Amino acid sequence: MSPAARPSFAIGTVKIRPGHAREMGLPITKLVTGAEVTLPVRVLHGRQDGPVVWLDAAIHGDEVVGVEVIRRVLATLSPRTLRGTLVALPIVNVHGFMSGDRYLPDRRDLNRSFPGSPRGSLAGRIAHLMMREVIDKCEVGIDLHTGSDRRTNLPQIRADLDDPRTRSLAEAFGAPVMLHAKLRDGSLRAAARERGATVLLFESGEAMRFDQWAIEAGVTGVLRVLAALDMIDPVADASPTQSLVSRRSGWVRAGRSGIVHLDATLGQRVEVGDRLGGLSDSFGKTLRLVRADRAGLVIGRTTAPLVNRGDALVHIADIEGAEPPGVPDHPDAAEAFDALDEIPVL
């Protein structure tokens, strides 16, 4: 198909011709100083027909891994060879990103504010803008996240694994594990699904950190999905590993307050009763051991050294079906997982 045969892509007040890329800012609001705040967007409108896909990051302002994932993905793509259209939003929660805060200035969680309203709260207005200008024009989306404050996550996809197309794209992403995750009211994933979009939520790494293994896993996974959608040619040496599947997970919590020393590492297989670490007082006296309450795979853990009774320590996912020995090879994260083992106190 010639470039002229494909219509331009309209977003905001801009139209992007086939074979071109464009950066813009969608107006959100003004600061008290009068400075305008805009939602940064980059559109790659390919010469040839194909799916319209969005990538977004930093819906929680302190989750910076996805920002770098999108930067690196865009650096590999050209609208002259892309089949379809890619809409990239590296920083959705602009206010939170500028202040290093998970939430908006009014303490609202943007990811509980979709689909939003043009006359609602700041969160609602941002959500509505994103739905109107981006989600409603796309058929597939990848929502990039990290663990919340002082938690780190194994690279993982959370999605509706009972939907055949969603599962197919989750498998194409090739994260070490994919979790069947219920939709949450107010989330981007739930609102986009209501509009007919297929959505993958990627979790990897820790807030306010550029964990290289988390970034590399995200970049490779996104490119695999774009290749599976035939938007780009297959990525060399990026064939997906077979993801483990989980439909249930839970956190092991602190039995009492103290200083936590965790031995459990991301990607580790555990059995019921396995030692995950211990809690001590300030003089080093052991107060209580931390043990696994289920068999499965460690997909998340706290990085906080001080914990109170009831705090979440280690996230373990039950693994569906027969469990092969070990964890699928994940070269992007292997060195980082080994390094975590060497840190005596987290």
Image: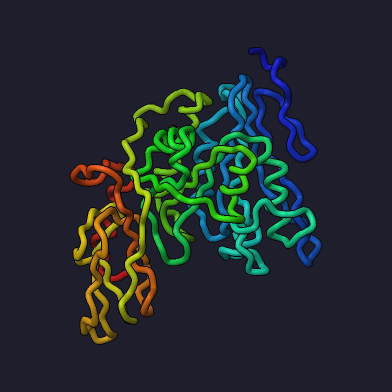
Depicted 152 relative to depicted 199: above or below: below
Quadrant assignment, res 2:
top right
In the drawing, does residue 173 fall left or right of residue 284?
A: right
Q: What residue lies at 36% left-to-right and 57% top-to-bottom? A: 249
In the picture as drawn, the residue positioned furthest to the bottom comes out as 283
Whether 233 is drawn above or below 192: the answer is above
> Which residue occupies 68% across, 45% down?
131
Q: How is the image coloured?
A: rainbow
Residue at left offset 21%, top offset 81%: 286
Q: Position of residue 33 (x, y in %)?
A: 79, 66
User: Can residue 25 be seen here?
Assistant: yes
Q: Position of residue 312 (x, y in %)?
A: 38, 69
Q: How many marks?
A: 0
The part of the image, by quadrant, that contains residue 104 is: bottom right
The C terminus - image quarter:
bottom left
User: Residue at point 62% right, 43% down?
Assistant: 194
- Vertical arrangement, residue 312 with respect to residue 142, above or below: below
Between 76 and 280, the one lying in front of the other is 280
Q: Where does the image place residue 288, in percent across and percent down from the top left?
A: 23, 79
- Quick check: 116 left or right of 198? right
x and y percentages locating residue 340 in the rendered image:
28, 59
**Left or right: 327 as drawn, with respect to 85:** left
User: Is residue 222 in view?
Assistant: no
